[in-house]
Image (cartoon, rainbow, N blue to C red):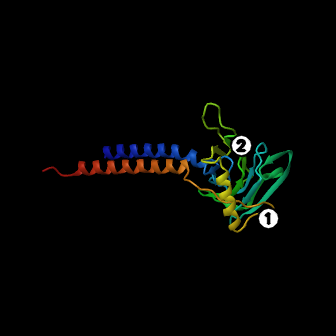
């Protein structure tokens, strides 16, 4: 019995370690995928997990960067949710290859739906043209719960590389391959022309980019594999211990 208790203690410790690794990565509001090419167009999903056991998420408010405004933004409908896209005039027009940009999307709000405890929801957005003079875009997000609590995901990355308590969703921008992103933008624009525009009428839809698995999911699967391995090891050792000797 002492062996069984020791095995149970080891498994409990492994489970706690796995939870400690996985939960922080899954708890934050993030952008998936987390990177895109400079100068092109992309599709991203704002992934919103519900962190509370006694309340549902009922509203998501995403603020778009004012220092690097995006000319084209469109949203994918989410069943059960209403979406409002807000545009505003820029203090200084921004020159783009499509002309001077005088207005841009400043905020997108999803409301009316529910993300229950233990669940998450993804809110997809197509956007571009992505700037070429910065390596990242921040999208401060407010998450409202049915209890009235509002969590403000707006903190910038820390200088020492550690994660902030309430980090803003961050889209990293990488140099475009080949011709500096013009090819990607052209291909995306062509795909957009052939795709149905099932989004907000006040903005122009653009083509979708690629998606990838989140780091949080990888951590969770890795941790689950560790726990499964430990369980198998414990059961095998227990079976050997109980085998009658010749």
Q: Position of residue 147 (x, y in %)?
A: 72, 54
Is 182 on the left or on the right of 228, as rendered? right
Q: Tag 1 or tag 2, which sits nearer the N-term? A: 2
Category of crowding for the residue at label 1, using alpha-carbon neighbours closer than 10 angstroms: few (below 14), some (14–19), many (at least 20): few
Q: Nearer the viewer, residue 237 or 72?
A: 72
The residue pinned by badge 1 equals: 201
Relative to the observer, which residue lies in front, 84 or 205?
205
Label pair 2/1, CB-CB below 8 angstroms: no
- Mark 2 and mark 1: span between their CA atoms? 28 Å
Q: Nearer the viewer, residue 172 or 10?
A: 172
Q: Position of residue 240 (x, y in %)?
A: 24, 49
- Most distant residue in the front direction: 179
The residue to which callout 2 is attached is 154
**How would you rate the neighbour count of disc 2 (Cα within 10 Å): few for under 14, some for 14-19, many for 20 or more?**
many
- Please identify the quarter of the rendering in which residue 43 is found: bottom right
Q: Residue at x 32, y 43 (%)?
A: 2
Find numbered disc 2 in the image and state the secondary structure of the residue it sits on: loop
Q: Would you place residue 197 above or below residue 26 in this image?
A: below
- The x, y position of residue 102, in whole percent, is 85, 50
Q: Is residue 13 above or below residue 208?
A: above
Q: Can you say whether 196 is above or below 206 in the image?
A: below
> Looking at this view, is 148 or 159 the one in front?
159
Quadrant hosting residue 137: top right
State the residue lying farthest toward the left.
246
* Residue 45 appears in the picture as rendered: no
Tag in front: 2 or 1: 1
Q: Residue at x 78, y 42 (%)?
A: 67
List the single residue furthest toward the top: 160
**As drawn, is 16 to the left or to the right of 1?**
right
**Percent position of residue 74, x then y:** 73, 59
Residue 4 visible to an observer of this rendering = yes
């Amino acid at each position: 019995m002492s062996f069984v208790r020791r095995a149970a203690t080891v498994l409990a410790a492994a489970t706690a370690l796995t939870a400690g690794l996985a939960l922080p990565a899954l708890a934050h509001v993030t952008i998936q995928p987390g990177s895109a090419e400079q100068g092109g167009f992309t599709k991203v999903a704002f992934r919103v997990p519900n962190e509370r056991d006694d309340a549902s998420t009922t509203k998501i408010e995403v603020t778009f960067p004012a220092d690097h405004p995006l000319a084209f933004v469109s949203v994918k409908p989410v069943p059960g949710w209403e979406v409002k896209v807000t545009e505003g005039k820029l203090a200084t027009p921004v020159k783009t290859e499509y002309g001077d940009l005088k207005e841009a999307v400043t905020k997108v709000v999803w409301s009316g739906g529910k993300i229950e405890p233990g669940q998450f929801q993804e809110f997809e957005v197509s956007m571009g043209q992505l700037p070429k003079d910065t390596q990242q875009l921040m999208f401060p997000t407010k998450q409202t719960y049915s209890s009235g609590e509002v969590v403000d995901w707006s903190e910038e990355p820390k200088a020492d590389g550690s994660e902030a308590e309430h980090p803003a969703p961050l889209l990293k921008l990488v140099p475009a391959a080949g011709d500096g992103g013009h090819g990607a933008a052209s291909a995306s624009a062509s795909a957009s022309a052939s795709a149905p525009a099932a989004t907000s009428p006040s903005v122009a839809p653009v083509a979708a980019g690629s998606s990838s698995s989140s780091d949080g999911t990888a951590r969770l699967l890795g941790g689950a594999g560790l726990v499964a391995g430990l369980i198998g090891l414990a059961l095998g050792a227990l079976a050997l211990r109980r085998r009658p000797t010749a």
